Amino acid sequence: MHPIVRALLALAVGTAVMAASAQTVDYPHKPIRLVVTFPPGGSADVIVRMLVPRLNDKLGQQVVVDNRPGAGGNIGLTVVAKAPGDGYTIGVGAAGGLSANVSLYAQMPFDPIKDFKPVTMLAAIPFVLIGHPSVAAKNQRELIALAKATPGKLSIGHGGNGTAMHLSAQLFSQMSGTQFVEVPYRGSGPAALDVQ
């Protein structure tokens, strides 16, 4: 079994055990809502959708994916934080929504420490710098040279303000001494589609 699928099954079973120990009725006895803090088509969504059929079989209940993108994960995480703590609403988010956003937003709609119970890390997803074939740069060195020669003319898309992709784009610009026009998307899926 693929390591990601094993980790996701551990999430489901771990959540089921925690919820069952807190309830007198058998868990799960109704569908489970799996809130993904990014839009369909991104890496988090793809991982979750690979897992759902196995979760359905393992838990004997339907797991329903609910994509709630936006605000660097805050929208989806707010849905999870405000849901009853009965194990029927589970969240899948990124580190940015649970760590960086407290520094990026003046007010948070939830407390990342008090409002959530971590279950497992599902995956480590690498970031890849890609570009449209029409960009006159064939590697990172050429991209940096082009960006320095034309400051503010090239754009860099990322998965939304407050996400690790956003912070990575900022770090890349800072470390390379370049200036890009930033284009925030509601997730990596829509950003990658626009590069085509």
Image (spheres, grey):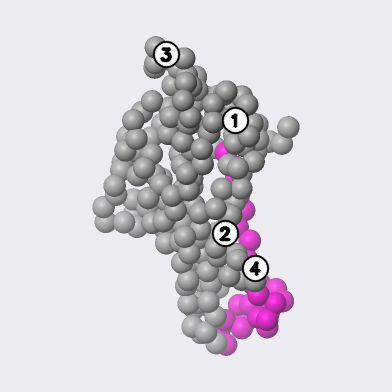
Tag 3: amino acid: Val
Mark 2 or 3, nearer chain start: 3
The earlier-in-sequence mark between 1 and 2 is 1
Residue where numbered disc 1 is placed: 55
**Cα–Cα gap, marks 1 and 2:** 24 Å
- Please identify the residue farthest to the top as the structure is shown: 24
Which quadrant: the C terminus? bottom right
Q: Residues within 10 Å of mark 3 (few under 14, many from 20)?
A: few
Q: Residue at x 51, y 64 (%)?
A: 158
N-terminal of the pair, mark 1 or mark 3, is 3
How many neighbours does mark 2 have within 10 angstroms: few (below 14), some (14-19), or many (20 or more)?
many
Residue found at x 56% / y 48%: 44
Is residue 18 visible in the rendered structure shown here? no
Checking the image for residue 25, the label placed there is 3
Which residue is pictured at 47% across the width and 44% down the height?
66
Residue marked by disc 2: 189
Checking the image for residue 74, the label placed there is none
Magenta residue span: 122-149
* Residue 79 image-quadrant placement: top left
Residue 142 is one of the magenta-drawn residues: yes
Q: Position of residue 154 (x, y in %)?
A: 55, 80
The answer to whether mark 4 and mark 3 are in CB contact below 8 A is no
Q: CA distance from mark 2 to mark 3?
A: 39 Å
How far across and down, in percent of the image, does residue 152 sit? 49, 83
Q: Tell me which amino acid carries mark 2.
A: Gly
